[in-house]
Image (tube, coloured by chain):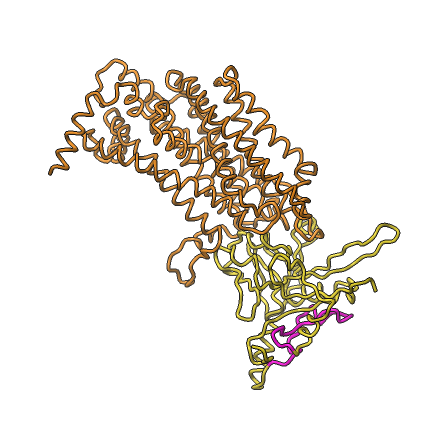
Chain colours: A orange, B yellow
Amino acid sequence: MIAGGMNDAASINTDLLRSVFRTGKWWYLTVLIAGSVMLAAGAAFLYQAYVGIAVAGINRPVYWAFYITNFVFWIGISHAGTLISAILRVTGAEWRRPITRCAEAITVFALMIGALFPIIHLGRPWLFYWLVPYPSERGLWPNFRSPLAWDFFAINTYLTGSIIYLYLPLIPDLAMLRAKSKGIRRRIYSLLSLGWSGTPLQWHRLERAVRIMAVIIIPVAVSVHTIVSWDFAMAIQPMWHSTIFGPYFVVGAIFSGIAALIVAMAILRKVFHLEAYLKPVHFNNLGLLLLTMSLLWFYFTFSEYLTGYYGNEPAEMQIFWSKVSGPYSPLFWAMVVCCFIIPVPILAFKKLRTITGTLIASTGIVIGMWLERFLIIVPTLAAPRLTFNWGHYRPTWVEILITIGTVAYFIFLYAVFTKLFPIVAVWEYKEGIRPPHTSMEPTQSEATAAVSAD
Amino acid sequence: MADAQTSATPRWGMVIDLDLCTGCEACVVACHAENNIRIAGDDQAARGRSVNWIRVERYFEGEFPDIRARFMPVLCQQCDEAPCEPVCPVFATYHSEEGLNAQIYNRCIGTRYCANNCPYTVRFFNFNDPVWHEPLQNAWNPEVSVRSKGVMEKCTFCVQRIRKAEMAAADENRPLRDGDVVPACVQSCPTRAMSFGDMADSSSNVARLARSDRATRLMDDLGTKPKVVYLKGLREG
């Protein structure tokens, strides 16, 4: 496998490992800028922790705003990867091969960032570990009735699963990097490749493990965003207490996740010259998936608002009108335009479903889905049932900087990842262009047979 | 159960007669003094950071010029089915044996979920550390802790006064009597619109008032089972 010997295998290696072994000035510039913004956001967070969360724009009654929006947004983006890649693997979609890794990496990084926000938003962030169930001197377990405690477990499960699911298919590539690198990098790769030597038994076990993880991760991913939605749906506040929030959020998450994946792929294709690997067909196929999700998203949004409208409860209607024609209406209609009106025509027509077309649609969707989360959270809180307490919300520079900073953090993590690991799974790609398992399959089944005969 | 037992666990409740409330806000001032409630200051108050465990809500009835202001003091309703309680991940808010909806400041990590799930908007967050301009801190009530930044707080039904009355009764080896516990807001009300006592004792003043045909509970259609009862005339008096 590693030795290859074939001409095209060698050129694949050169193409896909170029980003790992050669570093251009643009990479340094990206890391420098993203890193600086990230550090500035970190400083803003420390300032907020020191002075108090009064430096943010939240108030009574709008106790949650930008931070929880970002939390839901990033957890949503994280559904790009693992879920898409797992579904495509389980269904045996051959075209998945060059996109699985960049999707799985999005998941891990988006989750890492999303999981930061419940900590950033705390009044006393240094005590976040009180959510961890361990026998403490406080003699107190977390409250398992609280959706926030469910969040803690759901996100940690998903993060652990996603890291394993990213790592497993990385092992053969790590072994190849081990062979091609020197010095400290060689030592790190050889440590991470866990003694991979490409024996049939190892291949067999790896493929099995990846297959099992792909099946496990799908229900985990679905449960995660369902539980995130339950942060709202379990509350009795108008326009939060909705039975369809679970599936509505899962659809929204996959929707924004695919959009983020397309944006990432378009950028990777450009900066790493992966035109031969990330082809129009990938953007076309993902574009079709995105179209499906856009229609589903519209269906859920329409159902949610229409049933609320027909219920005609005063507390609910107050919030309904504040979104549809009140102070939040510019954001609301911007959301509809970004998530439905722009993407659907682009994605529906084959002529427009090009790389540029899907990129435009996806950018709109990522913005629109951020607005969607903001519009679920803030209008409800701003108009409590006792009208005397109505309020409004305006973000401060701290919240804006931290929001931008996490985008920079994402870019930073992604840039560093492309430096350490090939962003297209090399072995998986090669496996796809060869007639499946020409030389491997007989030996592998023989080896398995031999092992099981023992 | 059927017989009123003064020695049984009390269920503290309050009755507020809206027909007697003049909206003078003496209760608000008394509450601030009793419970060491921070003074937010102009700037923070304008940004929605003021803390008032009890507030007088003002609503207008009718159209100008035939218009009339109505006042409604709103404090924590000490719900028996409190929506704020199950959502706290760290048990900072919980239900006491006496039915009080208690807030434990040093358990609170500041998720603010409880406040988001309170239909009465009576939970207050400490967005920053309180500032006490000299010599205001000399007026602190030593029986009530001062809350630091990052924790939620709300009306306690003056739990320190409840404890004090209970201890005094225990010292004198007698059961609590109706009227032994008087929260600061009730004590300061010039029109005696507010009363406080044991709802479980059917002979208590509050239990008697709660049986009035003027009695109503705020948004009890939500199933929160509030322990604050409002009295309001069926017709304008």
Residue at the top extreme of this rendering: A7
Residue nearest the viewer, comparing A202 with A16: A202
Question: Main SS of the magenta segment?
Answer: loop
* Image location of residue A205, percent across then percent down: 23, 35
Q: Is residue B195 magenta?
A: yes
Indicate left or right for A14 with A2 as reference.
right
Residue nearest the viewer, comparing B26 with B14: B14
> Is the N terminus of chain B in the top left, top right, bottom left or bottom right quadrant?
bottom right
> Is the C terminus of chain B in the top left, top right, bottom left or bottom right quadrant?
bottom right
* Residue shown at 48% from the left, 47% from the top: A119
Q: Is residue B128 visible?
A: no
Q: Is residue B52 visible?
A: yes
Residue B119: quarter of image? bottom right
* Image location of residue B159, percent across then percent down: 59, 70
Is residue A383 positioned above or below A431 on the image? below
Residue at the right extreme of this rendering: B65
Q: Is residue A210 magenta?
A: no
Residue at the left extreme of this rendering: A454
Indicate left or right for A315 with A430 as reference.
right
Residue A32: quarter of image? top left
Range shown magenta: B176-202
**Total number of numbered discs in the rendering:** 0
* Residue shown at 62% from the left, 77% from the top: B201
* Image location of residue B203, percent across then percent down: 66, 79
Residue at the bottom extreme of this rendering: B173
* Residue shown at 56% from the left, 71% from the top: B98
* Residue shown at 40% from the left, 62% from the top: A137
Is residue B168 positioned above or below A293 on the image? below
Residue nearest the viewer, comparing B136 with B90: B90
